[in-house]
Image (tube, coloured by chain):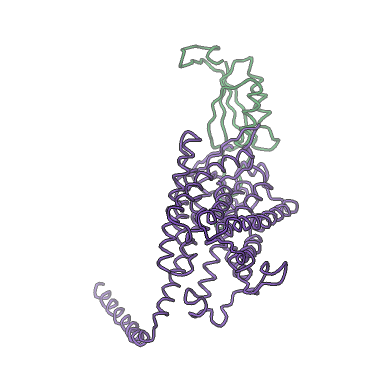
Amino acid sequence: MKLIIAYIQPERLNAVKQALFEADVTKMSVTNALGCGAQGGFHESYRGADIEVNLLKKVRIEIAINEDFQQNAVDAIIKGAKTGSIGDGKIFVLDLADCIRIRTGELGREAVG
Amino acid sequence: MRTKWKIFGGLAVVMLAMLVAPGAFAQEEEAAALTPADVLFTVNNTWMLVATFLVFIMHLGFACLEVGLTRAKNTVNILFKNTAIVAIGILTYAAVGFNLMYPGEFSDLLGGGVFGFAGFGVDPGADGQTIAYADGAYTYWTDFIFQAMFAATAATIISGAVAERIKLLPFLLITSVYVALVYPWLGSWKWGTGWLDAKGFYDFAGSTLVHSVGGWGALAGVIVLGPRLGKYVNGKINGISGHSMPLATIGVFLLWLGWFGFNGGSVLSADPNLVSLVFVTTTLAAAAGVVGAMISTWVIQKKPDLSMVLNGSLAGLVGITAGADSVTVMSSVIIGLVAGVLVVAAVLLIDKAKLDDPVGAISVHLVCGIWGTLAVGIFNADINVGVQALGVLAYAAVAFPAALVLFLIAKVTIGIRVSEKEEIGGLDVGEHGMEAYSGFQIFTSQ
């Protein structure tokens, strides 16, 4: 079992969800995040003074996945999120020690689904 | 320290007394020369000026309502549009609009009563500031500024319908031309004693002249601009929630407050009977609009939708605007009730037709504007429904194509729609480089 954590641009979320849906991955957790990477912030101004905006809005997607779906899920995320410009995001793949479904008490691969 | 202030205080009182005293004496001399007509002139004029600033506050109402019913990432843009269009509307009205709307004399074009222009700029003329100008009802300046407020409201109706995806510059250009030229020219047909007025067409405070003219502009914009991204996907209608119901509610109540001036001032004097009657018909129609919308939304949508109910009060207000002074109180309730039901139906049907109107401007102003205009003919035996319908059609035949042309010209020259990236990131950052809620983590990925 793996846990995929992907940071993407907020405006790509719908595209990523759609791509994941087409890859048969429908379970995920989405949170808002602030982050920065190579993108370096953007320019805002307020009443004549410039504002440095360094922490940008990002969307974080977490997906617990069985190994056989892992590559599909990663490809789907890349397909949905990639625009070619700086700030597309990053995907981390972690090993998942265990997974329990609360409603039924199922463990491991069945719980991941 | 205390003594210093006591001395200053004493000095101030003495100086004040010296300033006021001569004035008090002069007052007594002038009081003797005031006639009842003069007093009435002042009373009438004062009411008209109060009505003027009541209509003015409607702009804050529009701004709050539009902001509340759209997404946070576009709030600066909407506020900017509302502020700018008020300013531009009033200035163009001073430059050309007032004299287009009230030309005094019409040219013979198309049989007369169709087009007239009294010259650029505002000029009170010989008796503009005297009791003779409007039979002691108001001065030229009052006339101008009161009407100028109306002009600005017609323009601002469009801003809600095209919100969240229109580029700022083309919007300002289009609405500037629309409010500077189209609105006043069409207004001359009735209020400027043009050909529709001669036919007996009746529009007390502007259901057609203001609300439907704005509504036709809104409809044209919605059609040419297209829907917001993600609104109609795969045949499904997706709701895009407004981000502040409190602001929307504040906006609607400010508009309702302003309507006391909008309709009350359209009596064009402080006539106690008419103004008080108008206050009553206006308010009852608004209340009935709320109830009509509340019942409709509860039945159709299973749970009562606040934004529909808010639109309902506005629908009732727009509906009564054509005939607030010429229908019975009972009629005003029915007119408001019907408007409340109509607006809910219109919002749903317009959405079904894949026309994206984020705030329901078309439903409130166009649909209920037409209803209000016809309703006067229905509920007042002295007014001919046929002529009312003629007026509706005449305005439709000119306002809608004019707006369409403006939007299309802008579309093919400078483009009217923001890029997809900007629309998703928000027009606040895209068009203005700033945020409305800086420091608040308001996220949106839609």
Give the answer, above or below, for where A107 lies relative to B78.
above
| Residue A105 spot, x, y in % from top left | 46, 12
Vertical position of residue B156 compared to residue A26: above or below = below
Q: Is residue B80 visible?
A: no
| Picture coordinates of residue A110, whole percent (x, y) | 54, 12
Q: Residue at x 41, y 57 (%)?
A: B280
The colour with which the image depicts chain B is: purple
Image quadrant for the C terminus of chain B?
Answer: top right
Residue B206 appears in the rendering: yes
Vertical order, A27 against B255 (above or below): above
Give the quarter of the figure containing the N terminus of chain B: bottom left
Foreground residue among B364 and A33? B364
Q: Between residue B208 and residue A55, name the one nearer to us.
A: B208
| Residue B221 placement (x, y as % from top left) | 65, 50
Residue B438: where, in percent of width, then height?
51, 47
Q: Colour of chain A?
A: green
